[in-house]
Image (spheres, coloured by chain):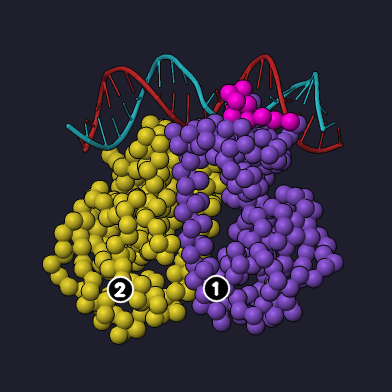
Chain colours: A yellow, B purple, C red, D cyan
Amino acid sequence: MSETGTFHACLRCDLRKRSLFGVLCDNDCNRVDLQKSSLRYKPSEVIYDEGSRPKGVYCVSRGSIKILKTGTEGKEQILKVAKAGALLGYRNIITNEQHANSAIALEETELCFLPRALFVELMANNEDLRSGLMREVCQEYDELADTLTDIAQKPVRERTAATLLMLMDTYGLDSIENSPLDINVSREDMANMVGTATETLIRSLKELKKEGFIETKGRKIKVLNGRGLLGLVRS
Amino acid sequence: MSETGTFHACLRCDLRKRSLFGVLCDNDCNRVDLQKSSLRYKPSEVIYDEGSRPKGVYCVSRGSIKILKTGTEGKEQILKVAKAGALLGYRNIITNEQHANSAIALEETELCFLPRALFVELMANNEDLRSGLMREVCQEYDELADTLTDIAQKPVRERTAATLLMLMDTYGLDSIENSPLDINVSREDMANMVGTATETLIRSLKELKKEGFIETKGRKIKVLNGRGLLGLVRS
DNA sequence: AAATGTGATCTAGATCACATTT
DNA sequence: AAATGTGATCTAGATCACATTT
């Protein structure tokens, strides 16, 4: 992890409007600018670790991050993938507990770090921020409940299809048809998203490839028939 | 579902202090008393249904309720069991969506129903209520993430042990040692908590019984060695 | 009659041991 | 050297078909 050299003012951040910090007023933004640091992480660098005390919140400006729990024998269970615009690490500031999960960069990632005290102060003074966070956590709860039900009940093949669609969305591959050749996540990470063994994930991808839903070039995956994958997920 | 005959004033409800509504002032309580209805549900009666529009919130005063999603081919995935003191059904009022899960009584259950508009008004006027709810949702998110990781990674035997401990806690069977003969949930419901087939759950219980962790009498289960079960869960 | 339980059988997915590719 | 991929084998748990209990 290192400081990014350049300074990006909150007020001129075009991601802000699409994030939970969209509600900050000019004055709030200035306060954030004074206290934040802009950090850069390399792939697989740890942003925060399960069990540690939350030091602040992280506002993602570029890249992608896996949010995960470490389960049996160190196997990761990836709960979600955060991308630009996401706010991370605030949940256990609110519960006043240690981090219940870890955040690790999937690719080169930049984010702004806000110290805990500043975040607490912003929350205290901004009802819009509080209600935005509230809505966000509620939505994330429902998403997690969906994932849990899928893992408990759906076969690997369908969960693999769902994960591919999630990744397409995360990496912004335009429409559901005809995405560029760009899903570039390790097979192990993908297996930990699906909740299966790496070998099983690889076989599942091979099957989807044989059936023409996807194409692979090395580790890169191109989705050829997103609508078809969606059909598998819905079944 | 039927009205309970008797009227219980919020101010005199001794559960209130231990619930999210503990923060309501006398005036709030009076407003609630004017608009709430006290309802009684029989076992397996539906309190609200996945996909329906939230009509209000439910404050549980007696009994227990399963919160579940209906997955593949109608198989239930039980996300949690709510007991007296719990507040249900508010999450999708906040997200302004349809209910993302269903609530079904596990036994004879009583609760107070507050219409949506009243709940929204209480939230709007009471910062303590808002922050209590916020903390609650954050905690529930973390609990669900734990459950998800267990389902993805732990064998049925360990998840069965975890479910038994959860049920002991829910049904208030004093300490971890020597609980009375009182876990009385259908094998099917228990299987849907563990996330397995009913036959598999039954075999799993049989094994735990053979090993002396539990004792059964008909469908009732008595935990003989809670500490031992905890050991299984931790492994 | 519905829930619980059992036995027999099947299979999806895990695991292990390597080969191949990046 | 680490990630990807493959083949062989194993096994936990699902499924099916009933018997037994409440």
Q: Examine the rendering and report whether any part of residue A159 can be seen.
A: no
Q: Write down the chain letter for disc 2.
A: A
Separation (CA) of disc 1 from disc 2? 23 Å
- Residue drawn at (73%, 34%) of the image: B219
Q: Where is residue A204 in the image (x, y as percent from the top left)?
A: 43, 35
Whether residue B184 can be seen here: yes
Report the label total.
2
User: At 21% from the left edge and 68% from the top edge, which residue is drawn?
Assistant: A37
**Which residue corresponds to mark 2?**
A118
Residue B213 colored in magenta in the image: yes
Specify the segment rendered in magenta: B207-217
Q: Is residue A24 above or below residue A156?
A: below
Residue A117 in picture, x, y percent from top left: 31, 71
In the image: residue A12, left or right of residue B33: left
Q: Which residue is drawn at 66% across and 47% down?
A: B171
Chain of residue at mark 1: B
The answer to whether residue B174 is left or right of residue A39 is right
* Above or below, B151 relative to B101: above
Q: Toward the viewer: B41 or B74? A: B41
Residue B9 quadrant: bottom right
Q: Given the image, on which type of amino acid does mark 1 rest? A: Leu
Q: Mark 1 points at which residue?
A: B129
